[in-house]
Structure formats: C-alpha cells, structure tokens
Amino acid sequence: MSTTDLSFTSPSARPPEAGLGPRGGPSAVLRGRGVVMTPVLELRGVHKTYRLGEHVVPALRGVDLALQAGEMLALTGPSGSGKSTLLNLAGLIDRPDAGEVRLRGDVVTGIGETQATLIRRDAIGFVFQTFNLVPVMTVADNVDYPLFLTGRPVAERRERVAQMLQAVGLAEHAKHRPDALSGGQRQRVAIARALVKRPTLVIADEPTASLDSHTADQVLDLMREQGHAQGVAFLIATHDARLLRRCDRVIALLDGQIIDPQKESSNELAMA
Ligand code: ADP
C-alpha cells in the first residue's frame, strides 16, 4: 500500500481476519515448505528522542520488534525505559524520528493524521489501566461506540455488541452504567469495546494494575481467549508479574533498547 492509499482503513476493504494482507490477498509468504506470516505489527530500527528545551531525552534507541496475529506480547521494563513511547508509536499516536513502523506489512511511518486516525478507528483497539469508559453511557453504548464511529448499520452493531457482551460475560449488564460495575467488570467492558470492531491489534497499557489478583486472572484469561479466537495481536505494557506469566512472549526494555535475554543470561552467568 502506498502511504496515501486509504483502502487499508476502509471497513469494506479490510480483510475479514487478522493476518490477511490489506488488499485482501493472503499475507502469508510461502518460503520453501514453511509459511511465514507477515507480522501484524513490526518495528524496524525505531528511534524516538524527545527534546525539552536544551534537554535531549532518547526514549527509544533502535528498537526492532515483530508481533504476530493471535500473539500476546508483554512489554516490560522499569519506569522511563520507553514502554509508553513504544505503545504510542504502535498505536499511531506518535511517530518515530528514524526507523519504520509497519502494520500488516504496510509502512505507516509518515502517513498523514487523517489516515492514522482511520487506521486507529478500524484496526487498533486500546485498553487502559483506568478503563476510560464514558460514565454517562450504558455498558452497551460504550461497547457500541467504536462501531458507531465506523458508520456500520444499526442492526449489525446491535448484534455485534450483544455477541461481545455475551463473550465477556456481561450480557445482563448491557443497560447499566459503568459506575454500577466492579473494576473487573469495567475492564471486561473495555476489552469488549476494544475487540468489537475486530481489530488486528490491541494495545493495552497496564490493563491489570487496578485489579485484584483473582479479577486480573479472569481479565487476562478473557483477553487470551478472545484474542486467540479472533486472531488479534495484543501488545501489553506492564509491570504485573501475573500478566507476564500468562503472555505468549515477554520483551524487556531498558533505556530505550530491548534487552537481549540471551545476553542477559550469559551476563548473569558471567557474574555468578
Ligand atoms: P515508560 O513508559 O517505560 O515509563 P516512557 O516511554 O514514558 O517510559 O519514557 C521514556 C523516556 O522518555 C523517559 O526518560 C521520559 O522521561 C521521556 N519522555 C516520555 N515522554 C516524553 C515527552 N512527551 N517529553 C519529554 N520526554 C518524554
């Protein structure tokens, strides 16, 4: 796709499943006998530096990352290591100074703000630590909102919202306001809201930080189950050890760089 081609973001042109290419053709590349899938999200040599007056803060320093459809990837690292910066780049909220961001194989670095908004609307779901539900809207209306933005027919929206609320176990709360729900239930609404548009990528920022252990486990199981069922890739920034254990893969950032686990373990061995 050229960077001005909006077909990627048009609902009717979107592939029915994550992992298919933007033009409707399969993105799997046949190499020999193996099938290599185009990653849902790819970062190549990404750099991001903030400038505050005379201060130069390198937030990301040459990050490479590939995330596959259906994969749940945890991004960990101490405060200030670059996690939020990376999420912002993956969610097309910000752009790198150097390097490339690709979604389903398409370079999205350098696209315009309108196109980035449309891609976010159609292909990316967001889940936040504090749920970010609209308090004056019912649970069903909160989940419906992303579909409303895409202009889908009312009947289809109703059906999808009902299915999604069923899937997250909140069908009986459809008409309630978020403040009538527990924290875990609110996060399940937020997950339903993120998944209802059938995105290719869900970006989650500390999604379990406000939840007790039992509830966090339930929310994580739900994300896994729904993500795997829909082939959605999850990129999750977290400090939560409970979450790290349940993800398919964990990547650690330190000072804007991904720590190579092999190097780390050989360093640990060398120091032992
Ligand atoms: P994390 O999410 O791991 O805590 P961040 O991505 O927020 O890390 O921050 C990485 C580095 O970039 C930190 O040194 C932080 O102070 C700096 N930083 C982040 N956002 C900005 C900004 N908008 N302006 C200036 N510096 C920033």
Image (spheres, rainbow, N blue to C red):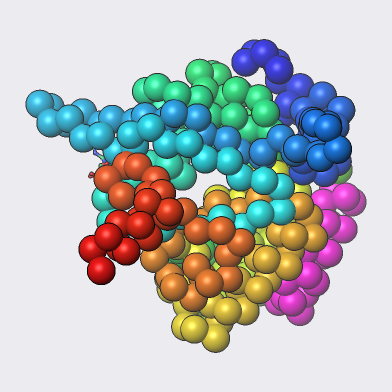
Q: Quadrant of residue 142?
A: bottom right
The vertical placement of 32 against 213, above or below, is: above
Which of 257/145 is in front? Answer: 257
* Residue 234 seen: yes
Which of 231/115 is in front? Answer: 231
- Which portion, as a residue range, is magenta? 154-174
Q: How many numbered callouts?
A: 0
For ligand 1, which image quadrant applies?
top left
Residue plotted at (73% across, 26% down): 8
Give the residue at the far left of this rendering.
54
- Whole-percent x and y of residue 170? 72, 75
- Whole-percent x and y of residue 132? 50, 59
Q: Main secondary structure of the magenta part?
A: helix
Residue plotted at (67% across, 13% down): 2
* Residue 149 seen: no
The vertical placement of 219 against 43, above or below, is: below
The vertical placement of 180 against 191, above or below, is: below
For the C terminus, give its image quadrant: bottom left
Residue 26 as seen in the image, left or right of residue 145: right
Which of 256/166 is in front? Answer: 256
Residue plotted at (80% across, 31% down): 31
Which of 259/16 is in front? Answer: 259
For the N terminus, give its image quadrant: top right
In reply to whether residue 162 is colored magenta, the answer given is yes
In reply to whether residue 82 is colored magenta, the answer given is no
Residue 226 as seen in the image, left or right of residue 127: right
- Whole-percent x and y of residue 42? 57, 35
Give the residue at the far bottom of this rendering.
214
Residue plotted at (86% across, 28% down): 25
- Whole-percent x and y of residue 28? 80, 34
